Image: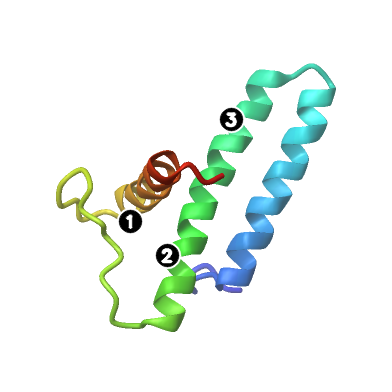
């Protein structure tokens, strides 16, 4: 993949899984702060994955939930998506 190309949902998910795997090794080695940093990044990758698969299935979809207001940047979009999923799980008791 060239630098200007957008990664596929499969590549995004693979990166998130790699980050989680790396975090496990760091945690096992007593480096919990470094592991936590990787987990946060992996969560952001998971949000990007959800956005990517949504856009693959529904190319014209608006992926910004607007939970925290209208934000133009993609990072905020992913945060809104993750927050919405977390709130849904809390509201309906699913895990």
Contact check, label 1 and label 2, Cβ < 8 Å: yes
Question: Quick one: 38 or 47, which is closer to the camera?
Answer: 47
Location of mark 3 (residue): 37
Relative side of 65 to 4, left or right: left
Location of mark 1 (residue): 74
Instruction: Classify mark 1: helix, strand or loop.
Output: helix
Q: Is residue 36 above or below residue 87?
A: above
Relative side of 69 to 32, left or right: left
Contact check, label 3 and label 2, Cβ < 8 Å: no
Q: Quadrant of the C terminus?
A: top right
Q: In terms of sequence position, does the residue under pointer 1 or pointer 2 come before the other?
A: 2
Real-space Cα distance between discs 3 and 1?
A: 20 Å
Q: Residue at x 49, y 74 (%)?
A: 5
Q: In terms of sequence position, does the residue under pointer 3 or pointer 1 come before the other?
A: 3
Q: How many neighbours does mark 1 have within 10 angstroms: few (below 14), some (14-19), or many (20 or more)?
A: few
The spot of residue 58 in percent (x, y) is: 37, 82
Q: Residue at x 72, y 50 (%)?
A: 18
Instruction: Classify mark 3: helix, strand or loop.
Output: helix
Instruction: Classify mark 2: helix, strand or loop.
Output: helix
Q: In terms of sequence position, does the residue under pointer 3 or pointer 2 come before the other?
A: 3
Q: Residue at x 61, y 36 (%)?
A: 39
Q: How many neighbours does mark 3 have within 10 angstroms: few (below 14), some (14-19), or many (20 or more)?
A: few
Real-space Cα distance between discs 3 and 2?
A: 22 Å
Location of mark 2 (residue): 51
The spot of residue 42 in percent (x, y) is: 59, 45
């Amino acid at each position: 993949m060239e630098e200007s190309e957008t990664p596929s949902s499969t590549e995004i998910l693979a990166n998130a899984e790699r980050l989680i795997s790396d975090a496990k090794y760091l945690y096992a080695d007593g480096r919990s702060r470094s592991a936590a940093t990787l987990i946060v990044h992996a969560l952001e990758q998971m949000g990007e994955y959800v956005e990517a698969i949504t856009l693959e299935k529904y190319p014209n979809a608006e992926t910004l939930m607007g939970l925290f207001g209208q934000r133009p940047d993609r990072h905020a979009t992913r945060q809104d998506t993750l927050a919405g999923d977390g709130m849904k799980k809390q509201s309906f008791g699913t895990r």
